[in-house]
Image (cartoon, rainbow, N blue to C red):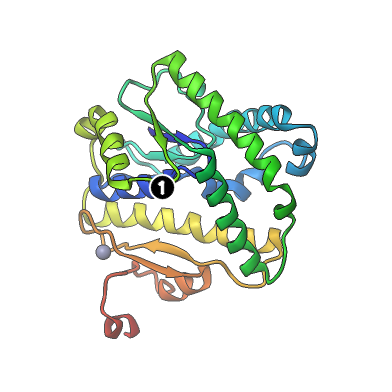
Amino acid sequence: MLWVGGAQGAGKTTLSWQLSRANDLPLHSIDLWAYDHLARLPADDSLGEQLARGPEAAADAFEATSRLRLDLVLGDIVARDLGKVPAIVEGPQLMPGFAGQLPPGWGIWLVPDPARARLVRQERLAKEEALASGPVTGRSRVDRLLQRDALLAGRIRAGAALSGRPVIEVPPVPDWPAIAAAAESALAPALRSAPRLTPGSELSLQRRHENMAASRQGRLWMRAAGLTVMPSYPFGCECGTSGCRATWMTTPDGYAARTASGRPLTAHGTPVEDAS
Ligand SMILES: [Zn+2]
């Protein structure tokens, strides 16, 4: 595995996506397995109950669940049958203290400024409210979530310092190219030596696996949150060409219809080709 950890709102997902495309590596976003893991984990307090006990207790609960989920993540990655190709695993669950024997140069942690974390939380809530056609319970607890996340960010900094892991600070107005360059530099040992997915069917099948995870998560999110509109997601092209960065923003239904005959999704066609 190659780890991209860090607190909520630091741009982990976008950065990991770029790295996966630039290097033909599998991408494994832990948040795309949230509902799947929920069904496989022992019953726990709700987020609301955790937050009600205060930010320290909520941060402890997040870390405890994240540690449990790491075992599930390992199983999910084994099931991808990647051979010696490492997956880029990204998510706020990857605390530096969990990295264990991860070699130097195989993990980075992105930590956002509090103003940026607030902005991203508010954007995500606005998106969920649009999909739910009304207010969602999250709005009343944004401040408590941000307090919890600020504590987790502090723990990431402290844990990374203790174990010599690289942290990249993400300011309120991020210079994304500079952050990407810093990440690539910190991950250079891994990116230099990692075997890549072979273009063609191997790369295509792994992109399909990632799209299926996104599709399942979207459906489960819709059901669990009572969304009235099916969420869209930038499904990645499955053409199997090395470095293909094309995506198609669509719903799980749209993705299923387009790939119904079992053919790979091609996301970079012209609109005319799209209609065919
Ligand atoms: Zn493509």
Say which quarter of the image contains residue 44: top right
Residue carrying label 1:
173
Q: Is residue 194 above or below residue 216?
A: above
Q: Is residue 222 above or below residue 73?
A: below
Nearest the viewer among 267 and 17 is: 17
Q: Callout 1 environment at 10 Å: few (<14), some (14 to 19), or many (20+)? A: few
Question: At label 1, which amino acid type do we have?
Answer: Val
Instruction: Note whether ligand 1 is within 8 Å of mark 1.
Output: no
Q: Give x and y (percent) for residue 4.
A: 41, 36
Q: Give x and y (percent) for residue 156.
A: 51, 26
Say which quarter of the image contains residue 150: top right
> Would residue 70 be found to the left or right of residue 236 on screen?
right
Q: Residue drawn at (44%, 73%), measured in percent from left and top?
A: 260
**The C terminus sits in image quarter:** bottom left
> Would residue 125 be found to the left or right of residue 213 on screen?
right
Q: Give x and y (percent) for residue 40.
A: 65, 41
